[in-house]
Amino acid sequence: MASKIFPLLPIAPVVQQRAVASAARLGVDRIDLYQVHQANPVVGDTTTMSGMRTLQDVGLVGEVGVSNYGLRRWRFAEAALGRRVLSNQVRYSMIDRGPEEDLIPYAERAGRLVIAYSPLAQGFLSGRYDATNPPSGAVRRGNPYFLPENLARGTELIATLREVADAHDATPSQIALAYLLRHPNVVAIPGASGVEQMERNAAAAEIDLADDEYAALVAAARAFRPVTGLAAVPRMVRARLRAR
Ligand SMILES: NC(=O)c1ccc[n+]([C@@H]2O[C@H](COP(=O)([O-])OP(=O)(O)OC[C@H]3O[C@@H](n4cnc5c(N)ncnc54)[C@H](OP(=O)(O)O)[C@@H]3O)[C@@H](O)[C@H]2O)c1
């Protein structure tokens, strides 16, 4: 059982009250992993982690985790807790590979976990969508990866995913998850629109990618150059106007 605290004023007594309330709502007497949803820019981790330490000491919380933390702040949180902060939940997928630079090497060195959220890049890596068939829904309309131009730029990457998937009698989504799980200290938490997707996603943990397949996926992921940041803004506005 894992839960998160949204860190609105995450001072020690608030952290403790919120954990007690969460456990009661969940009907459990122990939260195995209690995570800070994101770093608070004003309230430091010293007080937050003091609250977490008390929760561990009384047995209400098993392990402490964080989310959306950079490496420095993760390690600072550990120093403040005086114990390991077991996991850091961050955006990580084949097209958001930032955690490979520092968080995953740290997790491997120190025996910690990176929990990958949006591991399918909100469905971009499923291969269901292309420039002529973008997804609907406000969340994905606000994601530059789903601009028709970026969907077109992703054609080669999706083709590589399909090729590897065919060799395993699997789907592109499963291969995109297997890519992440090749890192031993990574756990993925894909979202699913239905039970079938959920079952397929769980089955991806059984897929072993060969070295050459992994290398092909790495190369295809690196070759994908989406339009993001400021350059994407006018395109997003135009895409919205066209969708009206
Ligand atoms: N810590 C944080 O700050 C944070 C932030 C964001 C998300 N999260 C968590 O991360 C989890 C997942 O992230 P996410 O939902 O944003 O993105 P995701 O897991 O990358 O993508 C989920 C979407 O991919 C498609 N999909 C999933 N499995 C599939 C399959 N087997 N075959 C084909 N398509 C499949 C589905 O969309 P369609 O079927 O509609 O295409 C599904 O809604 C959520 O539980 C969320 O709570 C955490």
Image (spheres, rainbow, N blue to C red):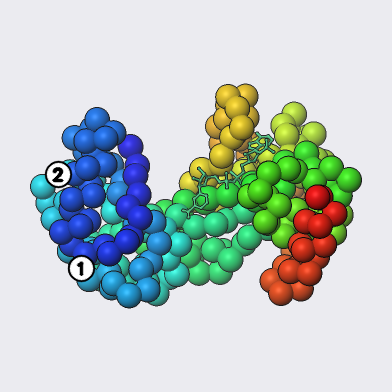
CA–CA distance in space, label 1 to label 2: 19 Å
Q: Secondary structure at mark 2?
A: loop
The residue that mark 1 highlights is: 47
Q: Position of residue 137 (x, y in %)?
A: 68, 44
- Front of the two marks 1 and 2: 1
Classify the position of ligand 1 by quadrant: top left, top right, bottom left or bottom right.
top right
The residue that mark 2 highlights is: 59
Q: Which residue: 48% across, 46% down?
A: 187
The answer to whether 47 is drawn above or below residue 244 in the figure is below
Of residues 244 and 180, the one drawn nearer to the viewer in this rendering: 244
The image quarter containing residue 170 is top right
Q: Would you say residue 144 is visible in this rendering?
A: yes
The image quarter containing residue 87 is bottom left
Q: Which residue: 56% across, 39% down?
A: 191
Q: Position of residue 166 (x, y in %)?
A: 80, 34
Q: Secondary structure at mark 1?
A: helix
Q: Would you say residue 153 is visible in this rendering?
A: no
Query: Mark 1: few, some, or many residues within 10 Å (few <14, many ≥20)?
Result: some
Q: Which residue: 60% across, 27% down?
A: 194
Q: Position of residue 33 (x, y in %)?
A: 31, 46
Q: What is the quadrant of the N terminus in the image?
A: top left
Query: Mark 2: few, some, or many residues within 10 Å (few <14, many ≥20)?
Result: some
